[in-house]
Structures are given as C-alpha cells and as structure tokens.
Amino acid sequence: MGKVLIKNIKGLVQYGEDLPQFRRGEEMKTLPILENAFLALEDGVIVAYGSMDDWGGITDWRDLEVIDAEGKYVLPAFCDSHTHTVFAKSREEEFVDRINGLSYEEIALKGGGILNSARKLAGMSEDELFEQAMARIDLLKSYGTGALEIKSGYGLSVEAELKMLRVIKRLKEASGLSIKSTFLGAHAFPAEFKENHRGYIDMIINEMIPKIAEEKLADYIDVFCERNYFSVEEMAEILEAGAKVGLRPKVHVNQFSALGGIKKAVEMNALSVDHLEELTDEDIEALKDSNTMATILPSCSHFLSIPFGDAKRLMENNAAVALASDFNPGSTPSGNLQFVWSLACVKMRMTPEEALNALTINGAYAMDLSSTHGTISVGKKTPILITKEIPNLAYIPYAFGDQHIERIIE
Ligand code: NIG
Ligand code: FE
C-alpha cells in the first residue's frame, strides 16, 4: 500500500496519544479536533500527524500518494461492535406483516423471526453465505465501517452454527477489515426443542461449545436473554460454559423486557451488554462506573418502533456507551452507521461528539480493538475516513440519509 499523506485537512477528528481505552459519562463530551492538519500513513499504520503549520515537509517522495483534504474532515473509521452480517435472505414479508399490525414478538411466536432465518440458512451453502456477506461488507465499508463484530445464531443446529462461524472465519481472512466473531447458538429455541429447552441448552454446552473451542471459531459468546427466549439463569449457565473455554460474554439483553440480565452479565465480566431499550434502576446501577460497555442499537428501535435506549441517563450515571448497527434481516436491515449517528442525535439527544465517541473509541473497546482502532494515534492501524466537503462535523448527523464519506483508506 505504501505511503499516504493527507494534507490541508479541515479537521482531524479523534486524535491523540495516551488516550483512555474508552470514554465514559461526562468524558464522552470530549472529542479532540485538530484544524488545518496533516496525517501520514505507512502501509496503513499512522506514522505522524499534526498542524500544517508545523509540518516539516517531505524528505522522501518515493511511493507516496498525496491527498488534498481541503474542506474535508478525517476521522478513524466507525467500529460496529454488534452485527449479524452473515444471514441467508432478507425478510420483507415480516416487514409488511408488521405494517399490517402484527408485532415483532407475534411474528416470532408464529414461527417467523429468527426461526424463519434459520430455515432459510439451513439450505444455503457456505460459499453462497460467504459471497453474500462479502458484498454486504463492501457496502458497510462505503458507509464508513472499518471494523465489525459478526454473530452466528441463524444456524441453531451444531452443523449450521459451525457453518456460520466458518463463514465468519473466512470473512476475517478475506475482507481486509478487522472482524470479531461471536457464537450466538442461544439466539432462539429451534422448533424441535420448543418443549425441551434443557435439550437445546445441553446441545449448546456439550456439543457446540467444545467444537467451537477446538476449531477456534469464536472470540465471544452471546445469549438472547429475553422473555420467550433465554432466562437469566439459562444465560448464566451458557456464559459459564463459554467462559471455561475463554469466550467472553457480549449479550443481547433488555430489548423488550428487563429480566435482570444486565446485572448478571456485568457480574460475569461481560465485555458489553447490548440493546438496552428497557432499563430499570437496578440495570443503571449495574452499569454505573462499570467496564462493561453499554451498547445501544438505535436503528433497531427505529425499524421495530420500540423505545430508544436511554443513553443520556446512562451517561449521567457514568456508564460508557457505544453505538452499533445490529445489522440483520429481521430487526435492522441497515448497517449504515452514518444513519445510526443521526438517530442517536435526533432520537436519543446525544450530542454529535458523544455519538462519535460511541461509534469509534467505545465501539473499538467493545471488540477488544482499542490498541489498533477507534482513535488517530501513532502506531494504530485503523482504516481512515475522509469526508466530502462539509461545513462542520455536526453536518454529518444533521443531513441524515446522505452519503458523507468520500473515501475509506484501509
Ligand atoms: O438483535 N434480538 C435478537 N436478535 C436480533 C434480531 C434477529 C432477527 O430478527 O433476525 C436483534 O435484533
Ligand atoms: Fe442483535
């Protein structure tokens, strides 16, 4: 890739050395921006940045691409810490059912939802799943995503869960982005285990987890802790089995109901708790001062017309908040994080600065990528975003629905 010099940058965003691993509470208002700046990269690694006034000039012009970013902002790529990017087919039929009055939960109870995706995935080859997911990742990149987590969870059998995780492994190798893989066998009870929850949990613990550990197919473990899905006790048992083989929890909790899963997950050292549309005082208490990232998914709230997570209350209570897409065919058929940024500002009243912290430094932490991604610091290897010419940074979430990213440098 060689050397790249970006000059005349209107604002170099989220830069600095010796930065914290993530920002929490009040600190989320902090967003360093250096005006009239330059940034130098070598083979994708940040080697220098600073003010154009202090720039010492180029000594070695060989193999150097110079980009003029006059009027444009430069920022670290977004870090999407919660996605279901590998799936078989879209589910517009359920979207229309919801327009006609059915709820997401009602659709799931009649065999739609996650089970619908699992049926569709069962008949699809690893190659087909891989090709489709690669095309989706290319689209995510164009919107500014530079690192992402992908979950299994549409397999729900030993064979199909492994198939999904193998596809994610291939994406890690081929996509050019940093990808983290999460095992979500406990996404729903398959139809044949509807009356035999114990049987499916035993299959997860005794068959899926050992194979996944043996083939090193996952970085994290997830459970959908929710009424009609997995109880807090079931979640704890599955997370415990994952922890024994080194899989740290990142869990779906409090999407429709607050069952106490947040407190339990924090106690079990979860890296993140995700969704959080419903929050009790006890949940807030558990996240106060904690190192577990509170990850909110506003595009899911938008698409399902459910409450938006209360990021303001979390930040007032010194929690650390990340934003992610939840990209999946059922609840969030968009992985566009520019739109997530806008929703966070408009619907959750996060400031543009707070929301960008949630999309970069805090998202990176929620995937253990703090040492390489999320900020512009010497030695980091994050993809870099160059915006189009815009009047200021707030213009991105303000002018929602537009494409503001001109280029991503990997
Ligand atoms: O995060 N809530 C659980 N899982 C996904 C949706 C899955 C689906 O509907 O396919 C989510 O929203
Ligand atoms: Fe999800």
Image (cartoon, helix red, strand yellow):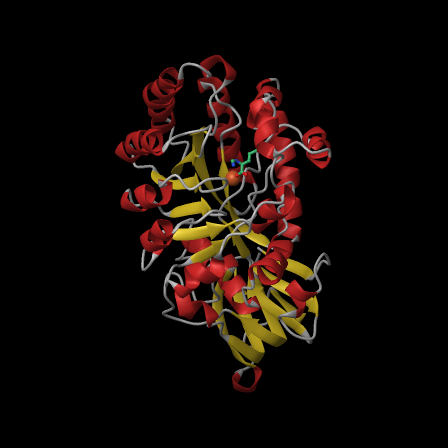
User: Residue at 26% across / 32% down in the picture?
Assistant: 244
Q: Nearer the viewer, residue 346 or 206?
A: 346
Residue 280, position as x, y percentages in the image: 40, 49
Q: Is residue 46 left or right of residue 248?
A: right
Q: Vertical placement of 164 versus 348: above or below? A: above
Q: Position of residue 158 (x, y in %)?
A: 44, 19
Instruction: Check the image and report above or below for 17 versus 254.
Output: below
* Vertical arrangement, residue 394 with respect to residue 115, above or below: below
Q: Is any part of residue 360 visible from this angle?
A: no
* Of 212 and 328, the residue lying toward us: 328
Tell me if residue 209 can be seen: yes
Residue 375 in the figure: left or right of residue 73: left
Q: Residue furthest bottom?
A: 53
Decide if residue 146 is on the left or right side of residue 197.
right
Identify the residue shown where x is 32% and y is 52%.
Answer: 286
Q: Position of residue 173 (x, y in %)?
A: 51, 39
Name the quadrant of the C terminus: bottom right
* Quadrant of residue 232 within the rendered picture: top left
Ligand 1 quarter of the rendering: top right
The x and y percentages for residue 257 are 46, 40
Residue drawn at x 47%, y 47% is 278
- Looking at the picture, tell me which residue is in the foreground, 5 or 251: 251
Q: Could you tell me how many numbered marks the image carries?
A: 0
- Residue 290 is left or right of residue 176, and the answer is left
Q: In the rendered image, which quarter contains the N terminus?
A: bottom right
